[in-house]
């Protein structure tokens, strides 16, 4: 075994003293680093997570408040109580979908070798970019197509008669139908 280690060390020392091998190792290392760096730009994740702006936060707060007020009206109609409470939680804020344009280009090339062999190659390239519009102040912004409402994480309802099983089921049915969510996301409890 000592002889194998000595021959390996000798081979590595010989390789490191050869300028040609050192250049190839350096080039391979630089190419590897470049590929790792470029993979960050071409990740297949699709959307980049955007930071929430104060406007988005305010819009999400207004959306939550509107949902809570609408549900409160429904629950008051079901229970007859004026002091019921509703809390709605959201998965995330609303998202904008922006208009995009896609440019496709295709190319074919044929190469004939001296031995009557034909080699053909085709390429398809697709480039996607956002459509920009100019504001009155001259700044450019992406053209918004639609806004996707945030997904509802859960709803909590607190009311005086919330312990009654039949009333509880009626409230759960109303909330799940109004918001199109599953009953596992709705909790109805009595006032304690």
Image (cartoon, rainbow, N blue to C red):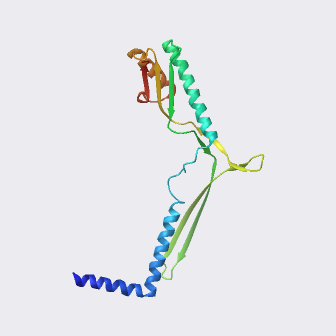
Most extreme residue toward the top, as rendered? 80
Seen in the picture, residue 127 relative to 27 is either above or below; the reply is above
At 56% across and 70% down in the image, what residue appears? 109
Q: Quadrant of residue 21?
A: bottom left
Give the percent coordinates (x, y) of residue 93: 56, 39
At 47% across and 23% down in the image, what residue appears? 157
At 62% across and 43% down in the image, what residue appears? 53
Seen in the picture, residue 140 relative to 75 is either above or below; the reply is below
Quadrant occupied by the N terminus: bottom left
Give the percent coordinates (x, y) of residue 185: 43, 30
Most extreme residue toward the front, as rendered? 192
Seen in the picture, residue 49 relative to 153 is either above or below; the reply is below
At 77% across and 50% down in the image, what residue appears? 138
Give the percent coordinates (x, y) of residue 13: 36, 85
Seen in the picture, residue 155 relative to 131 is either above or below; the reply is above
Quadrant occupied by the C terminus: top left
């Amino acid at each position: 075994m000592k002889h194998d280690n000595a021959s390996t060390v000798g081979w590595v020392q010989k390789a490191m003293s050869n300028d040609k091998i050192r250049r190839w190792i350096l080039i391979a290392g630089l190419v590897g680093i470049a590929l790792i760096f470029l993979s960050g730009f071409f990740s297949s994740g699709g959307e980049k997570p955007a930071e929430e702006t104060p406007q988005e936060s305010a819009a999400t707060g207004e959306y939550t408040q509107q949902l809570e007020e609408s549900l409160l009206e429904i629950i008051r109609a079901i229970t007859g109580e004026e002091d019921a409470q509703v809390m709605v939680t959201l998965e995330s804020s609303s998202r904008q979908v922006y208009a995009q344009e896609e440019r496709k280009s295709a190319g074919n090339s044929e190469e004939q070798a001296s031995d009557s062999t034909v080699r053909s190659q085709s390429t398809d390239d697709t480039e996607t970019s956002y459509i920009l519009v100019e504001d009155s102040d001259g700044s450019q912004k992406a053209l918004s197509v639609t806004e996707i409402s945030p997904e509802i994480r859960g709803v909590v309802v607190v009311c005086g008669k919330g312990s009654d099983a039949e009333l509880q089921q009626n409230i759960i049915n109303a909330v799940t139908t109004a918001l199109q969510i599953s009953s596992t996301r709705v909790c109805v409890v009595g006032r304690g």
